[in-house]
Amino acid sequence: MKNMNPKIIELPKILDKRGNLSFFEYPQQLPFQIARTYWIYDVPGGEVRGSHAFKNQDEFIVALSGSFDVVLHDGENEIKYSLNRSYYGLYIPKMFWRRVENFSTNSLALVVSSTLYDVNDYIRNFEEFKRMKNAN
Ligand code: TYD
């Protein structure tokens, strides 16, 4: 899938008096197969995570609890997505600079990734990211 754009994906919501349930599967909700899952929690007030881009990995982020903002930059423009429901996820294709900020108390960010962890997949310099993005 080339030139994909970030998008909010609404997940199924099974309403139940005993408590609600949501899920995602490839390929019905997710545009990629999951290779890895991690989560971010116990974030102190005011902290910012993930100021970087990935050369290859796609990610999907869900605010399982609480809320936070995912700010994406495509090399020209920045868009902020506020995640605050456990039945919405944000799909982030490769080659978007992102930072995650404004975490509420006790927020829990679930992230599924299309690849295994690879330190060489990170672009940590914003100027280098812009050069690579504009060269595409
Ligand atoms: P990193 O992705 O740099 O976090 P953030 O972008 O949110 O600041 O990851 C922080 C540390 O965790 C880094 O030293 C590598 C380690 N890590 C893994 O070992 N496996 C993983 O799947 C992830 C996401 C991170």
Image: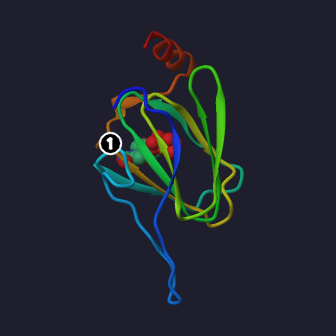
* Label 1, residues with CA under 10 Å away: few <14, some 14-19, many ≥20: few
Q: Position of residue 42 (x, y in %)?
A: 58, 62
Closer to us: 55 or 124: 55
Disc 1 residue type (three-letter): Tyr
> For residue 116, what is the image quadrant?
top left
Q: Classify 63 as above or below 35.
A: below
Name the side, left or right, on which 85 lies relative to 121: right
Q: Position of residue 133 (x, y in %)?
A: 48, 17
Closer to us: 32 or 125: 32
Residue at figure coordinates x 51%, y 79% from the top left: 15
Residue at figure coordinates x 49%, y 33% from the top left: 5
Name the side, left or right, on which 120 lies relative to 6: left
Q: Does the numbered disc 1 mark a residue whose Cβ is under 8 Å from ligand 1?
A: yes
Q: In the displayed image of the protein, which residue is found farthest to the bottom?
A: 18
SS class of the residue under badge 1? loop
User: Which quadrant of the rendered structure holds the C terminus?
Assistant: top left
Q: Classify 85 as above or below 17.
A: above
User: Which quadrant of the rendered structure holds the N terminus?
Assistant: top left
Q: Position of residue 18 (x, y in %)?
A: 50, 89
Q: Position of residue 23 (x, y in %)?
A: 41, 66
Residue at figure coordinates x 45%, y 48% from the top left: 60
Name the side, left or right, on which 113 lies relative to 116: right
Give the residue number, with chain letter if any, for mark 1. Answer: 117
Ligand 1 resides in the quarter of the picture at top left
